[in-house]
Amino acid sequence: MKIIQEENYEYTMRNEVEPYLAAHCRDKFVTGAKEDGQGKTTRAGKLHVKFYETERPKGVVIVSHGFTEGAPKYDEMVYYFLKAGYHVCIPEHTGHGLSYRLTDEPSLVHIDTWKRFVRDFLKVCHETAKRYQDLPRVLFAHSMGGAIGTIAAAWEPDFFHKIILSSPMIRPLTGNVPWPLTVAIAQAECLVGRAEKYVIGQKPYDGSETFETSAAVSEVRFTRYNEIRKRCKDIQTSAASYGWLLASIKMSWYLRYYGWKKLTAPVIIFQAEKDAFVSVRAMQKFAKKIQRRGKTSCEYVYIPESKHEIFGSDDRTVKAYIERILNFMAK
Protein backbone atom coordinates (compact mmCIF):
# COMPACT_ATOMS: atom_id res chain seq x y z
CA MET A 1 0.00 0.00 0.00
CA LYS A 2 1.39 3.38 -1.03
CA ILE A 3 1.29 5.82 1.90
CA ILE A 4 0.79 9.58 1.50
CA GLN A 5 4.15 11.13 2.35
CA GLU A 6 4.56 13.91 4.89
CA GLU A 7 6.74 16.03 2.58
CA ASN A 8 3.86 16.41 0.08
CA TYR A 9 1.04 15.72 2.49
CA GLU A 10 -1.12 18.83 2.21
CA TYR A 11 -0.78 18.99 -1.58
CA THR A 12 -1.65 15.31 -2.02
CA MET A 13 -4.60 15.44 0.35
CA ARG A 14 -6.02 18.56 -1.28
CA ASN A 15 -5.44 17.62 -4.94
CA GLU A 16 -5.72 13.82 -4.97
CA VAL A 17 -7.35 12.41 -1.85
CA GLU A 18 -10.13 14.96 -1.28
CA PRO A 19 -11.42 14.86 -4.90
CA TYR A 20 -11.26 11.06 -4.87
CA LEU A 21 -13.22 10.85 -1.60
CA ALA A 22 -15.79 13.40 -2.80
CA ALA A 23 -16.40 11.35 -5.95
CA HIS A 24 -16.98 8.17 -3.94
CA CYS A 25 -18.96 9.62 -1.00
CA ARG A 26 -22.67 9.71 -0.26
CA ASP A 27 -23.90 11.60 2.80
CA LYS A 28 -26.98 10.34 4.58
CA PHE A 29 -28.89 10.92 7.81
CA VAL A 30 -30.08 7.82 9.66
CA THR A 31 -32.63 7.96 12.46
CA GLY A 32 -31.12 6.72 15.72
CA ALA A 33 -32.50 3.91 17.84
CA LYS A 34 -36.11 4.48 18.91
CA GLU A 35 -36.14 2.09 21.86
CA ASP A 36 -34.06 2.00 25.01
CA GLY A 37 -33.45 -1.75 24.82
CA GLN A 38 -36.25 -2.48 27.29
CA GLY A 39 -39.14 -1.78 24.93
CA LYS A 40 -39.54 1.86 25.95
CA THR A 41 -39.56 4.61 23.33
CA THR A 42 -36.74 7.12 23.62
CA ARG A 43 -35.68 10.24 21.76
CA ALA A 44 -34.39 9.33 18.31
CA GLY A 45 -32.49 12.05 16.49
CA LYS A 46 -30.71 11.98 13.15
CA LEU A 47 -27.21 10.54 12.86
CA HIS A 48 -24.93 11.86 10.13
CA VAL A 49 -23.32 9.05 8.14
CA LYS A 50 -20.83 9.06 5.28
CA PHE A 51 -20.86 6.08 2.91
CA TYR A 52 -17.85 5.64 0.61
CA GLU A 53 -18.02 3.09 -2.18
CA THR A 54 -15.21 1.49 -4.15
CA GLU A 55 -15.20 -0.64 -7.29
CA ARG A 56 -15.43 -4.44 -6.88
CA PRO A 57 -15.62 -4.40 -3.05
CA LYS A 58 -14.50 -7.35 -0.97
CA GLY A 59 -15.94 -6.04 2.30
CA VAL A 60 -17.18 -3.01 4.17
CA VAL A 61 -15.37 -1.21 6.99
CA ILE A 62 -17.51 0.51 9.61
CA VAL A 63 -15.56 3.21 11.44
CA SER A 64 -16.28 4.10 15.07
CA HIS A 65 -14.50 7.41 15.76
CA GLY A 66 -13.10 8.82 18.98
CA PHE A 67 -14.16 11.43 21.54
CA THR A 68 -14.78 14.96 20.12
CA GLU A 69 -13.82 13.82 16.61
CA GLY A 70 -15.65 14.25 13.30
CA ALA A 71 -15.66 12.22 10.09
CA PRO A 72 -12.96 14.36 8.32
CA LYS A 73 -10.42 13.09 10.89
CA TYR A 74 -10.45 9.77 9.03
CA ASP A 75 -10.06 10.97 5.43
CA GLU A 76 -6.64 9.39 5.02
CA MET A 77 -7.72 6.07 6.57
CA VAL A 78 -10.88 5.99 4.42
CA TYR A 79 -8.73 6.55 1.33
CA TYR A 80 -6.53 3.55 2.17
CA PHE A 81 -9.53 1.31 2.83
CA LEU A 82 -11.11 2.31 -0.49
CA LYS A 83 -7.88 1.71 -2.40
CA ALA A 84 -7.61 -1.70 -0.75
CA GLY A 85 -11.06 -2.64 -2.04
CA TYR A 86 -13.40 -1.94 0.85
CA HIS A 87 -16.51 0.19 1.10
CA VAL A 88 -16.43 2.45 4.17
CA CYS A 89 -19.21 3.65 6.44
CA ILE A 90 -18.39 6.31 9.02
CA PRO A 91 -21.20 7.58 11.27
CA GLU A 92 -20.66 10.55 13.54
CA HIS A 93 -21.59 9.41 17.04
CA THR A 94 -24.39 11.00 19.03
CA GLY A 95 -23.23 14.44 20.19
CA HIS A 96 -20.60 14.78 17.48
CA GLY A 97 -20.35 16.44 14.07
CA LEU A 98 -23.65 16.83 12.26
CA SER A 99 -25.39 14.15 14.32
CA TYR A 100 -28.06 15.07 16.85
CA ARG A 101 -27.06 16.36 20.29
CA LEU A 102 -28.53 16.32 23.77
CA THR A 103 -27.15 19.73 24.73
CA ASP A 104 -27.19 23.21 23.20
CA GLU A 105 -23.58 23.82 24.25
CA PRO A 106 -21.63 23.42 20.95
CA SER A 107 -18.28 22.50 22.55
CA LEU A 108 -19.71 19.88 24.90
CA VAL A 109 -20.08 16.14 24.35
CA HIS A 110 -22.99 15.04 26.52
CA ILE A 111 -24.88 11.75 26.72
CA ASP A 112 -27.67 10.66 29.03
CA THR A 113 -26.79 6.96 29.04
CA TRP A 114 -23.89 4.99 27.58
CA LYS A 115 -26.34 2.61 25.95
CA ARG A 116 -27.55 5.38 23.63
CA PHE A 117 -24.10 5.50 22.00
CA VAL A 118 -24.20 1.76 21.35
CA ARG A 119 -27.83 1.52 20.23
CA ASP A 120 -27.41 4.41 17.78
CA PHE A 121 -24.18 2.96 16.40
CA LEU A 122 -25.84 -0.44 15.92
CA LYS A 123 -28.74 1.22 14.11
CA VAL A 124 -26.27 2.57 11.54
CA CYS A 125 -24.51 -0.80 11.40
CA HIS A 126 -27.77 -2.53 10.46
CA GLU A 127 -28.51 0.10 7.81
CA THR A 128 -25.05 -0.62 6.40
CA ALA A 129 -25.67 -4.36 6.42
CA LYS A 130 -28.90 -3.85 4.44
CA ARG A 131 -27.05 -1.66 1.96
CA TYR A 132 -24.25 -4.19 1.41
CA GLN A 133 -25.93 -7.48 2.20
CA ASP A 134 -23.38 -9.94 0.87
CA LEU A 135 -20.17 -8.29 2.09
CA PRO A 136 -18.14 -9.19 5.19
CA ARG A 137 -18.25 -6.45 7.84
CA VAL A 138 -15.14 -5.12 9.58
CA LEU A 139 -15.12 -2.83 12.61
CA PHE A 140 -12.36 -0.21 12.76
CA ALA A 141 -12.67 1.60 16.08
CA HIS A 142 -10.50 4.21 17.81
CA SER A 143 -10.44 5.40 21.44
CA MET A 144 -13.98 6.18 22.67
CA GLY A 145 -15.20 4.61 19.45
CA GLY A 146 -13.30 1.51 20.49
CA ALA A 147 -15.48 1.25 23.60
CA ILE A 148 -18.69 1.86 21.64
CA GLY A 149 -17.77 -0.48 18.80
CA THR A 150 -16.55 -3.29 21.04
CA ILE A 151 -19.73 -3.19 23.13
CA ALA A 152 -21.76 -3.29 19.89
CA ALA A 153 -19.78 -6.38 18.87
CA ALA A 154 -20.40 -7.92 22.30
CA TRP A 155 -24.13 -7.24 22.10
CA GLU A 156 -24.34 -8.77 18.61
CA PRO A 157 -21.45 -11.27 18.40
CA ASP A 158 -22.28 -12.48 14.89
CA PHE A 159 -22.45 -9.06 13.25
CA PHE A 160 -18.77 -8.24 12.62
CA HIS A 161 -16.40 -10.62 10.86
CA LYS A 162 -13.24 -8.82 12.05
CA ILE A 163 -12.62 -6.29 14.86
CA ILE A 164 -9.77 -3.74 14.67
CA LEU A 165 -9.23 -1.67 17.81
CA SER A 166 -6.81 1.26 17.67
CA SER A 167 -5.95 2.68 21.11
CA PRO A 168 -9.38 1.57 22.40
CA MET A 169 -10.83 3.21 25.49
CA ILE A 170 -11.11 0.11 27.65
CA ARG A 171 -10.60 2.58 30.48
CA PRO A 172 -9.99 6.32 30.06
CA LEU A 173 -7.06 7.97 31.79
CA THR A 174 -8.09 10.59 34.34
CA GLY A 175 -4.94 12.65 34.79
CA ASN A 176 -3.90 13.16 38.39
CA VAL A 177 -7.31 12.14 39.73
CA PRO A 178 -7.40 8.50 40.94
CA TRP A 179 -9.92 6.27 39.20
CA PRO A 180 -12.07 5.59 42.32
CA LEU A 181 -12.32 9.32 43.01
CA THR A 182 -13.24 10.01 39.37
CA VAL A 183 -16.04 7.47 39.65
CA ALA A 184 -17.32 9.05 42.87
CA ILE A 185 -17.23 12.57 41.41
CA ALA A 186 -19.05 11.58 38.22
CA GLN A 187 -21.77 9.76 40.15
CA ALA A 188 -22.24 12.60 42.62
CA GLU A 189 -22.37 15.35 39.98
CA CYS A 190 -24.95 13.46 37.92
CA LEU A 191 -26.97 12.67 41.03
CA VAL A 192 -27.32 16.36 41.94
CA GLY A 193 -28.41 17.37 38.43
CA ARG A 194 -25.09 18.55 36.98
CA ALA A 195 -24.84 15.88 34.27
CA GLU A 196 -24.83 18.48 31.47
CA LYS A 197 -22.11 20.64 33.05
CA TYR A 198 -18.48 20.75 31.93
CA VAL A 199 -16.18 18.38 33.79
CA ILE A 200 -13.92 20.52 35.97
CA GLY A 201 -10.85 21.66 34.06
CA GLN A 202 -12.55 21.34 30.65
CA LYS A 203 -13.49 24.38 28.59
CA PRO A 204 -15.23 25.48 25.38
CA TYR A 205 -13.38 25.19 22.08
CA ASP A 206 -11.08 28.13 21.39
CA GLY A 207 -8.83 26.79 18.62
CA SER A 208 -5.76 26.81 20.85
CA GLU A 209 -4.74 23.13 20.57
CA THR A 210 -1.07 22.77 19.63
CA PHE A 211 0.86 20.00 17.92
CA GLU A 212 3.09 19.60 20.96
CA THR A 213 0.16 18.69 23.21
CA SER A 214 -1.74 16.71 20.59
CA ALA A 215 -2.20 12.94 20.21
CA ALA A 216 -0.30 12.90 16.89
CA VAL A 217 3.36 12.43 15.98
CA SER A 218 3.18 13.87 12.45
CA GLU A 219 2.83 17.65 12.46
CA VAL A 220 1.39 17.81 8.93
CA ARG A 221 -1.24 15.19 9.74
CA PHE A 222 -2.18 17.08 12.91
CA THR A 223 -2.25 20.46 11.17
CA ARG A 224 -4.57 19.41 8.35
CA TYR A 225 -7.41 18.31 10.63
CA ASN A 226 -6.77 21.13 13.09
CA GLU A 227 -7.24 23.70 10.33
CA ILE A 228 -10.40 21.98 9.08
CA ARG A 229 -11.71 22.04 12.64
CA LYS A 230 -11.07 25.76 13.00
CA ARG A 231 -13.22 26.40 9.91
CA CYS A 232 -16.03 23.97 10.73
CA LYS A 233 -18.12 24.67 13.84
CA ASP A 234 -19.78 21.25 13.68
CA ILE A 235 -16.55 19.49 14.68
CA GLN A 236 -15.46 21.91 17.38
CA THR A 237 -16.58 19.70 20.25
CA SER A 238 -13.75 19.77 22.78
CA ALA A 239 -14.97 18.87 26.26
CA ALA A 240 -16.82 16.27 28.31
CA SER A 241 -19.91 16.66 30.45
CA TYR A 242 -20.26 14.76 33.71
CA GLY A 243 -22.87 12.68 31.88
CA TRP A 244 -20.27 11.65 29.32
CA LEU A 245 -17.75 10.94 32.08
CA LEU A 246 -20.18 8.63 33.86
CA ALA A 247 -21.01 6.96 30.54
CA SER A 248 -17.32 6.30 29.85
CA ILE A 249 -16.99 4.74 33.32
CA LYS A 250 -19.95 2.46 32.75
CA MET A 251 -18.68 1.43 29.31
CA SER A 252 -15.37 0.57 30.92
CA TRP A 253 -17.03 -1.54 33.59
CA TYR A 254 -19.06 -3.41 30.97
CA LEU A 255 -16.05 -4.11 28.75
CA ARG A 256 -13.71 -5.25 31.52
CA TYR A 257 -16.16 -7.48 33.37
CA TYR A 258 -18.60 -8.71 30.71
CA GLY A 259 -17.92 -7.54 27.16
CA TRP A 260 -14.69 -9.44 26.55
CA LYS A 261 -16.47 -12.74 27.18
CA LYS A 262 -18.99 -12.19 24.39
CA LEU A 263 -16.72 -11.38 21.43
CA THR A 264 -16.55 -14.10 18.78
CA ALA A 265 -14.94 -12.34 15.79
CA PRO A 266 -11.12 -12.25 15.54
CA VAL A 267 -9.71 -9.15 17.28
CA ILE A 268 -6.55 -7.11 16.78
CA ILE A 269 -5.60 -4.37 19.25
CA PHE A 270 -3.05 -1.64 18.49
CA GLN A 271 -1.35 0.03 21.44
CA ALA A 272 0.60 3.27 21.06
CA GLU A 273 3.86 3.55 22.99
CA LYS A 274 3.12 7.04 24.35
CA ASP A 275 -0.62 6.95 24.95
CA ALA A 276 -1.77 9.72 27.30
CA PHE A 277 -5.52 9.26 26.87
CA VAL A 278 -6.42 5.63 27.57
CA SER A 279 -5.11 3.08 30.04
CA VAL A 280 -2.52 0.78 28.49
CA ARG A 281 -2.76 -1.55 31.47
CA ALA A 282 -6.52 -1.95 31.01
CA MET A 283 -5.98 -2.59 27.30
CA GLN A 284 -3.38 -5.28 28.00
CA LYS A 285 -5.54 -7.02 30.59
CA PHE A 286 -8.51 -6.93 28.22
CA ALA A 287 -6.45 -8.62 25.48
CA LYS A 288 -5.06 -11.25 27.85
CA LYS A 289 -8.55 -12.20 29.04
CA ILE A 290 -9.64 -12.82 25.45
CA GLN A 291 -6.45 -14.74 24.67
CA ARG A 292 -6.73 -16.99 27.73
CA ARG A 293 -10.45 -17.58 28.20
CA GLY A 294 -12.29 -15.86 25.36
CA LYS A 295 -14.21 -17.30 22.44
CA THR A 296 -11.95 -15.86 19.76
CA SER A 297 -8.36 -14.91 18.91
CA CYS A 298 -6.80 -11.59 19.90
CA GLU A 299 -3.61 -10.16 18.43
CA TYR A 300 -1.90 -7.43 20.43
CA VAL A 301 0.35 -5.05 18.50
CA TYR A 302 2.68 -2.55 20.19
CA ILE A 303 3.48 0.47 18.00
CA PRO A 304 6.76 2.14 19.08
CA GLU A 305 7.28 5.91 18.85
CA SER A 306 3.57 6.56 18.46
CA LYS A 307 0.98 8.52 20.39
CA HIS A 308 -2.73 7.89 20.95
CA GLU A 309 -3.68 8.60 17.32
CA ILE A 310 -1.54 5.97 15.64
CA PHE A 311 -2.93 6.98 12.22
CA GLY A 312 -1.40 10.42 12.91
CA SER A 313 2.16 9.06 13.11
CA ASP A 314 5.18 9.47 10.82
CA ASP A 315 5.23 7.83 7.37
CA ARG A 316 7.14 4.70 8.39
CA THR A 317 4.82 4.00 11.32
CA VAL A 318 1.65 4.68 9.31
CA LYS A 319 2.84 2.33 6.56
CA ALA A 320 3.53 -0.51 9.02
CA TYR A 321 0.21 0.17 10.76
CA ILE A 322 -1.84 0.13 7.55
CA GLU A 323 -0.12 -2.99 6.24
CA ARG A 324 -0.76 -4.85 9.50
CA ILE A 325 -4.44 -3.83 9.39
CA LEU A 326 -4.91 -4.88 5.77
CA ASN A 327 -3.13 -8.21 6.36
CA PHE A 328 -5.43 -8.90 9.30
CA MET A 329 -8.49 -8.06 7.22
CA ALA A 330 -7.34 -10.33 4.38
CA LYS A 331 -6.87 -13.44 6.56
Image: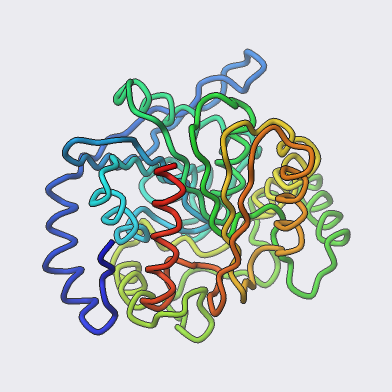
Name the residue at the front extreme.
331
With respect to residue 311, does 316 lie above or below?
Answer: below
Q: Position of residue 67 (x, y in %)?
A: 53, 56
With respect to residue 55, does 272 lie above or below?
Answer: below
The C terminus: image quadrant = top left
Q: Quadrant of residue 155?
A: top right
Residue for point 24% across, 40% down: 27
Residue for point 61% across, 23% down: 36
Relative side of 2 to 142, left or right: left
Q: How is the image coloured?
A: rainbow
Name the residue at the top extreme.
39
The N terminus: image quadrant = bottom left
Q: Position of residue 242 (x, y in %)?
A: 69, 54
Residue for point 64% across, 61% down: 198
Relative side of 280 to 68, left or right: right
Marker count (numbered): 0
Residue for point 74% across, 34% down: 261
Camera-side residue of 50 and 231:
50
Camera-side residue of 331 and 263:
331
Q: Position of residue 31 (x, y in %)?
A: 40, 27
With respect to residue 307, does 291 lie above or below?
Answer: above
Q: Position of residue 313 (x, y in %)?
A: 44, 74
